[in-house]
């Protein structure tokens, strides 16, 4: 088998690190990215290079670096992302723009950067890491849901646009996994006068409890490995607990208001 070169954004921790480590152990040549790789001097799971998905210049530099060293990029995994919580009404607009820059515009610009190269080599795989939260508008996580939902829809569109180029484009949608995402998540500040204070606080506590008790992200890595080795993978590949995946099935068959009631009950709203 030809050498497979993988580029993973956001590879220094969490799901990205799990995917990179798993693929490196399977014999893939893996490049992960971090905004400040010098902060990970003890990192040795795979190669870390500098990349800021908010910078088009940084994206082009990282892609060129990998191609210069390895001659190709076989697989792009758009994993870099950030969490955000808060009432829609009270979330600062600059934070809305920031989360879309990282979770949506960043992956789009990464795909734009690698597509000419993949088209020239006649093959390639792009996997966008979305989220089960992207299939539904979750209370107090509306902007996170929106970014991941938008990335999932772009995946659908781009698959059809590139179908004649030998390029496979798909997504993997994790549920809750035990990562450090909560530490870097932006929380909208809520004053004592906010109409949302009590319910937002209750929902945030529930979200954090779900992450604390979640599964090992190696399950996402196994799913990615399976996708890479399938001749024709599905467009949408959710991975999570039985209940999380079951909820996606319920959303397809239940009336909207009934499904909304289930979410309200889950978050005790």
Image (tube, rainbow, N blue to C red):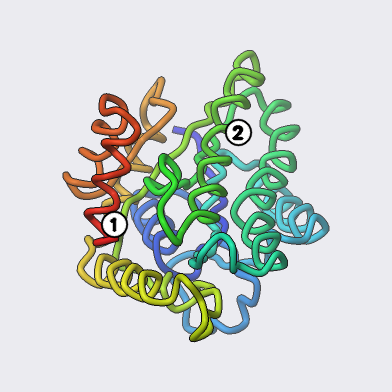
Q: From the viewer's perspective, tell me whether residue 206 is left or right of residue 143.
A: left
The image quadrant where one finds the C terminus is bottom left
For the residues carrying marks 1 and 2, which lies nearer the camera in this image?
A: 2
| Label 2 Cα neighbours within 10 Å, binned few <14 / some 14-19 / many ≥20 | some
The answer to whether mark 1 and mark 2 are in CB contact below 8 A is no
In the rendering, at what x and y percent does residue 67 appear? 70, 47
Residue 47 position by quadrant: bottom right
| Residue 232: x %, y % from top left | 41, 20
Furthest-right residue in this view: 57
Earlier-in-chain disc, 1 versus 2: 2
Q: Which residue is mark 1?
A: 218
Residue placed most toward the observer, 205 or 79 = 205
Q: Which residue lies under the disc numbered 2?
A: 154
The image quarter containing residue 16 is bottom left
What quarter of the picture does the N terminus occupy?
A: top left
Q: In the structure shown, which secondary structural element does the residue marked by tag 1 occupy? A: helix
Write the residue at 66% across / 67% down: 95
Q: Nearer the viewer, residue 32 or 24?
A: 32
Q: Is residue 82 left or right of residue 50?
A: left
Residue sitting at x 47%, y 83%: 42
x, y percent for residue 71 = 68, 43
Determine whether 182 is above or below 138 in the image. Answer: below
């Amino acid at each position: 088998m030809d050498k497979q070169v993988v580029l993973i954004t956001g590879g220094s921790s969490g799901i990205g690190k799990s995917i990179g480590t798993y693929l490196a152990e399977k014999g893939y040549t893996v490049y992960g990215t971090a905004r400040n790789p010098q902060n990970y001097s003890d990192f040795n799971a795979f190669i870390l290079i500098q990349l800021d998905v908010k910078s088009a210049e940084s994206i082009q530099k990282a892609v060129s670096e990998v191609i210069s060293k390895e001659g190709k990029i076989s697989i792009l995994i758009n994993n870099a992302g950030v969490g955000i919580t808060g009432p829609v009404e009270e979330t600062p607009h600059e934070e809305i723009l920031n989360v879309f820059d990282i979770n949506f515009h960043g992956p789009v610009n990464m795909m734009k950067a690698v597509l000419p190269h993949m088209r020239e080599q006649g093959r390639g795989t792009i996997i966008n890491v979305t989220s089960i939260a992207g299939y539904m508008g979750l209370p107090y996580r509306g902007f996170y849901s929106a970014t991941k939902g938008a990335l999932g829809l772009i995946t659908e569109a781009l698959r059809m646009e590139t179908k004649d180029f030998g390029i496979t484009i798909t997504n993997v949608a994790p549920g809750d996994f035990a990562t450090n995402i909560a530490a870097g998540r932006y929380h909208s500040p809520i004053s004592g006068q906010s109409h949302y204070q009590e319910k937002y606080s209750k929902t945030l506590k529930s979200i954090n409890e779900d992450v604390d008790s979640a599964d090992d992200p190696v399950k996402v890595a196994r799913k990615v490995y399976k996708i890479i080795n399938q001749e024709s993978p599905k467009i949408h590949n959710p991975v999570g607990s039985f209940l999380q995946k079951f909820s996606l099935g319920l959303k397809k068959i239940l009336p909207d208001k009934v499904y909304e009631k289930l979410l309200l009950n889950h978050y005790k709203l």
